[in-house]
Amino acid sequence: MRTSSLALGIVAALMMLGPVAVGADDLSPYASATEAYREGVTALKGGRMVVALPALEYAAKRRVLGAQLKLARLYAAGHDVPEDDAKAFSYFQDIADQYADISPSSPIAKYVGESLVALGQYYATGIPAIPLPANPRYAADIYRHAASYFGDAEAQYQLGRLYLSGEGVEKNPSLAVNWLATAAKKQHAAAQATLGELLWKGDEVRQRQARGLALLTLAHENSKAEGDEPKWIADLYQDAFAKSDNATRKEADLLLPENLRRARLHFPRRHSRQKARQRRGPRLRLQPRSGVRSASARNQTGPERVLRRRRQGLSASAACGAISPTTTKLP
């Protein structure tokens, strides 16, 4: 707890720091850029946008990272202020210009990764108001930096999608699967669902329906846990489950994390308790069977993989093992 509080304090301090170049004749109601940032955050929490915006803008112009990020998010989302992609783009660009090469181990690295992903999305679609023409190739370069250097899961997912579609890059299903699998192992629900759909249908990769169903189940559960499951993920999961046979469901079940298997969260609620018991066997035998499976899994994969599977969800070997692009569909 003490270490966590110290880390949060360091991040907060870094978010308020920035080069400040204020002239002697700069008349301002703020004692410093840091004080302006603090005042802006307080006003923002209280919904006093008339006070918050000038304070945050003052701090952002003096390169206070926290102020730049808050303004970028505000204008990108259009909450409390009119949506303004041009302003959001400008603030995200400022962050990228200052911190693109900061150490990936820095406490603020994740915010830089977030800013790079936002920039990539703007370059992928363009902003007519600036005007900023769409440039998918440059968007791919930005995603690649955020994905490889900062390890950003959203960037890895977006890069995987580009390699699937061939937009901005040469189409490469193998690289697409690699990036999607990397993001999926970080519990990125959209990446899990996209990779799960590929494996379930056998599109661009060798078909692995049990692994596909397991990944779709994880995407479904992770999305629900976040409180806002996208309809496309729910639809993919329900469709795959409805079309799978009992053998595929059981195999997918064994690939899921132990706690998820035990709770049987992946069984749709429309199935009755009686039908569930028919699949599982008598209630009294549930715990012994679960224990035997766990011991078997440990013997096969080793303690480290079991621990990793519990911590990360579907393990790398279970989720993505034996995945290979179909030779007939490779470019």
Image: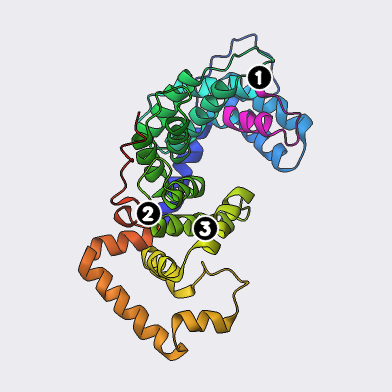
Give the residue at x 43% y 35%.
160
Closer to the camera in the image, 165 or 11: 165
Please, what secondary structure does the residue beneath circle 1 have? helix
Closer to the N terminus: mark 1 or mark 2? Answer: 1
How far apart, in angstroms, are the residues tagged by discs 1 and 2? 44 Å
The answer to whether residue 187 is left or right of residue 129 is left
Hey, what amino acid is under mark 2? Arg
Coordinates of residue 4 in the picture (x, y in percent):
43, 52
Q: Residue at x 48, y 23 (%)?
A: 139
Q: Position of residue 64 (x, y in %)?
A: 55, 26
The disc labelled 1 sits on which kind of residue?
Answer: Ala
| Residue 70 part of the magenta-drawn span | yes
Q: Of callouts 2 and 3, which one flags the residue occurring earlier in the amino acid sequence?
A: 2
| Between 13 and 266, the one nearer to me in the picture | 266
Whether 326 is among the magenta residues is: no
Measured in 3D between alpha carbons, the distance from the residue under mark 3 to the one under mark 1, in whole angstroms, is 41 Å
Badge 1 is on which residue?
A: 86
Q: Main secondary structure of the magenta part?
A: helix
The 10 Å Cα crowd at callout 1, few under 14, some 14 to 19, many 20 or more, is some
Residue 240 — which label?
A: 3
Number of residue marks: 3
Q: Quadrant of the C terminus?
A: top left
Magenta region: 68-86
Q: Which residue is mark 2?
A: 208
Q: Is residue 294 visible?
A: yes
Q: How is the image coloured?
A: rainbow
Q: Measured along the vertical axis of the image, is residue 246 above or below residue 320? A: below
Q: Secondary structure at mark 3?
A: helix
Q: Are marks 3 and 1 in contact (CB under 8 Å)?
A: no
